[in-house]
Image (cartoon, helix red, strand yellow):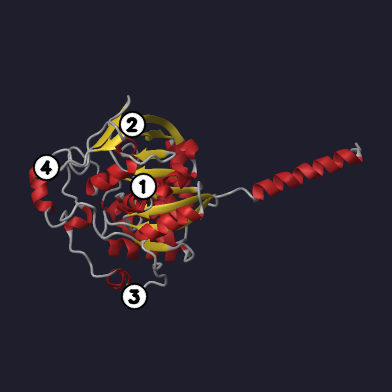
């Protein structure tokens, strides 16, 4: 059947428009703010974001929490080398949480306020002198990538101003860097597209103290400053959702079935665990935050509440507070993630780790 010439022209034009629209589709711009570890969970979150074609990872800012600033910087640089992503800038941030003397008094604090876990992150060991010392000790030499000269706080401010209304900031560790950034430059608050936290525990107990989840316990003052800021959108990925999903041997085998540098890292780190115990599992925390930034349709259930963080130095230090009705003066509405599509989540994670 012959198609009239003018219809052919319109049809070809529509195809060209569709192709141009697809080619020009904007990527989601993301800054990952992290207390980096090797692989689970911050490292895998970074790998997922760096490997996804729809994400533009503008940079990684490092904060203490699970690791000291020097350690987190070394681990970030090392894993970006493995990913062959030397183009992603890494900025070193603050060395300590906002509360003065927290590291020096942590043993007394734990005796006074109690704990759910003996784990205190970097507070449990001596701070290394530099990220170069960590690289030499753990990886046998200096990294091929260096951190940028800018402080993480300056990097956040400048990058957000350069991309107004486009950047999703992901504090998947303590909120210290972002808190200082919005205090120094409050004009960036309305310029941020979204803030996606990994932190908090609302309807479940804390995992560091009976009251508090680790990230927000590490720097409650910073977490409070952030959740009370009038960002356009805030999504909280806390223990309410994170404690529902576990990495297991079947997932490990899917990742390590490939012959890649990432697979080798998984074999080195988790192979011995599964050899000792085939039923070994672990939580994956930050990877859930990365997944819902990549694909928001993974969200099955969320709740909107007025959110706050208890920064009073007492038994409830670091507790997440969520009010279903209007909260105290100064609190803002935030979305709290409750459930995700588990099957699609694991498939996305494995896909991003086997590219």
**Is label 1 or label 4 in front?**
4
Q: Secondary structure at mark 1?
A: helix
Quarter of the picture containing the N terminus is: top right
Give the residue number, with chain letter if any, for mark 1.
286
Q: Nearer the viewer, residue 275 or 14?
A: 14
Earlier in the chain: of badge 1 and badge 3, it is 3
Q: Please rate how many residues cluster around mark 2, counting C-alpha atoms within 10 Å: few if below 14, some from 14 to 19, many from 20.
A: many
Q: Could you say where residue 15 lies in the image, as x and y percent from the top left?
A: 75, 44
Give the residue number, with chain letter if any, for mark 4.
113
Q: Could you say where residue 269 lies in the image, as x and y percent from the top left?
A: 32, 58
Q: Secondary structure at mark 3?
A: loop
- State yes or no: discs 1 and 4 in contact (Cβ < 8 Å): no
Marks 2/3: CA–CA distance: 48 Å
Q: Please rate how many residues cluster around mark 3, counting C-alpha atoms within 10 Å: few if below 14, some from 14 to 19, many from 20.
A: few
Q: Nearer the viewer, residue 148 or 203?
A: 148
Q: Could you say where residue 267 lies in the image, as x and y percent from the top left?
A: 36, 58
Q: Could you say where residue 42 lies in the image, as x and y percent from the top left?
A: 35, 53
Residue 152 visible in the displayed image: yes
Q: Nearer the viewer, residue 118 or 32?
A: 32
Marks 4/2: CA–CA distance: 26 Å
Earlier in the chain: of badge 1 and badge 4, it is 4
Q: Secondary structure at mark 4?
A: helix
In the picture as drawn, the residue positioned furthest to the top comes out as 325
Q: Nearer the viewer, residue 4 or 217?
A: 217
Give the residue number, with chain letter if any, for mark 2.
306
Earlier in the chain: of badge 2 and badge 1, it is 1
Earlier in the chain: of badge 3 and badge 4, it is 4
């Amino acid at each position: 059947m012959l198609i009239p010439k003018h219809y052919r022209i319109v049809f070809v034009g529509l195809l060209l428009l569709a192709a141009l629209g697809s080619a020009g589709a904007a990527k989601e711009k993301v800054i990952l703010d992290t207390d980096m570890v090797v692989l689970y969970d911050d490292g895998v979150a970074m790998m997922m974001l760096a490997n996804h074609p729809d994400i533009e990872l503008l940079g990684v800012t490092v904060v203490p929490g699970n690791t000291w600033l020097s350690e987190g910087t070394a681990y970030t640089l090392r894993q970006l080398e493995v990913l062959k992503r030397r183009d992603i800038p890494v900025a070193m941030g603050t060395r300590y949480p906002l509360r003065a003397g927290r590291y020096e008094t942590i043993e007394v604090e734990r005796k006074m306020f109690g704990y759910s876990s003996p784990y205190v992150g970097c507070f449990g060991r001596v701070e290394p002198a530099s990220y170069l010392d960590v690289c030499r000790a753990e990886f046998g030499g200096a990294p091929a990538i260096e951190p940028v000269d800018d402080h993480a706080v300056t990097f956040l401010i400048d990058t957000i101003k350069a991309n107004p209304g486009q950047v999703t900031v992901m504090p998947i560790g303590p909120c210290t860097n972002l808190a200082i950034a919005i205090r120094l430059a409050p004009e960036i608050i309305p310029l941020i597209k979204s803030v996606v936290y990994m932190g908090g525990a609302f309807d479940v107990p804390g995992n560091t103290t009976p009251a508090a989840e680790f990230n927000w316990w590490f720097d409650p003052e910073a977490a409070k400053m952030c959740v009370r800021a009038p960002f356009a959108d805030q999504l909280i990925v806390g223990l309410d959702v994170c404690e529902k999903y576990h990495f297991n041997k079947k997932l490990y085998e899917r990742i390590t079935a490939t012959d890649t540098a990432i697979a080798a890292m998984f074999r080195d780190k988790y192979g011995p665990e599964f050899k000792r115990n085939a039923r070994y599992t672990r939580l994956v925390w930050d990877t859930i935050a990365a997944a819902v930034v990549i694909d928001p349709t993974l969200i099955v259930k969320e709740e909107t509440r007025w959110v706050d963080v208890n920064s009073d130095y007492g038994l409830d230090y670091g507790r997440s507070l969520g009010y279903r009705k209007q909260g105290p003066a100064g609190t803002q509405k935030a979305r709290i993630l409750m459930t995700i599509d588990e099957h699609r989540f694991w498939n996305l994670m494995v896909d991003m780790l086997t590219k």
